[in-house]
């Protein structure tokens, strides 16, 4: 059995099942190494979940790394609606913004070369704008997380160009109202 297959089998097991295999099964050295690796991964995941949960409960993210903050921020809901009927808003916290600035030399260079421009559209420009939007919205989610919001409603994106002479900048601002959501009543 390959190490990849073995790792998948171990990953599907609970921590207790893994301990039982480690204590009672006869394993090759390679299988034991894979088992120990999976056990370490599960322990790290459990510890991370606990740290994230504690950080959210305390509203203190100072001990978390950028990847952990990004993971938590992914859970923040973004919508352009100002009063979404399916999002139970308990409290509006504050208006928040995220800003991203990109050098425009990229645009100048790509428009000078028509190698990737077809039918008046530039794939490079579209990709840059898409990445700018995704980056700015991810930053807006992080801003919301830092003030304890569950969602951001009324999200607006503003694209502007700041230029002087041959150089310029693409300036993107994402803004919205950070809100706390009503907690669902437990069902019995």
Image (cartoon, rainbow, N blue to C red):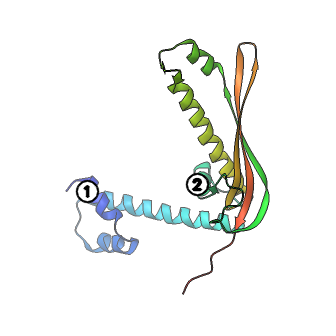
Viewed as shown, does residue 62 lie left or right of 48? right
Q: Residue furthest right?
A: 94
Q: Which residue is mark 2?
A: 74
Q: Is residue 148 visible?
A: no
Residue 5 numbered tag: 1
What secondary structure is marked by label 2?
Answer: loop
Q: Residue at 22%, 68% (x, y): give it.
A: 26
How far across and how far down the image is residue 43, in percent?
47, 64
Q: CA distance from mark 2 to mark 1?
A: 30 Å
Viewed as shown, does residue 34 lie left or right of 129? left
Q: Residue at 57%, 67% (x, y): give it.
A: 50
Which quarter of the picture shows residue 29? bottom left
- Is 19 drawn above or below residue 107 in the view shown? below
- Is 139 drawn above or below residue 171 in the view shown? below
Q: Is residue 124 visible?
A: yes
Q: Residue at 57%, 36% (x, y): give it.
A: 130
Residue 172 numbered tag: none
Which quarter of the picture shows residue 19? bottom left
Circle 2 crowding by C-alpha within 10 Å: few under 14, some 14–19, many from 20 = few
């Amino acid at each position: 059995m390959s190490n990849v297959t073995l790792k998948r089998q171990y990953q599907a097991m609970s921590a207790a099942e893994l301990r039982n295999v480690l204590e009672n099964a006869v394993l090759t050295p390679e299988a034991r190494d894979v088992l120990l690796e999976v056990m370490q991964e599960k322990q790290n995941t459990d510890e991370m979940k606990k740290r994230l949960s504690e950080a959210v409960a305390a509203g203190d993210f100072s001990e978390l790394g950028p990847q952990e903050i990004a993971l938590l921020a992914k859970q923040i809901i973004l919508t352009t609606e100002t009063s979404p009927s399916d999002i139970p808003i308990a409290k509006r916290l504050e208006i928040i913004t995220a800003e991203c600035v990109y050098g425009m030399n990229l645009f100048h260079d790509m428009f000078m070369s028509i190698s990737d421009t077809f039918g008046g559209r530039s794939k490079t420009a579209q990709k840059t704008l898409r990445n700018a939007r995704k980056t700015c919205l991810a930053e807006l989610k992080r801003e919301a997380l830092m003030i304890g919001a569950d969602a951001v409603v009324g999200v607006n994106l503003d694209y502007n160009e700041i230029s002087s002479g041959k150089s310029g900048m693409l300036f993107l601002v994402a803004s919205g109202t950070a809100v706390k959501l009503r907690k669902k009543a437990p069902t019995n």
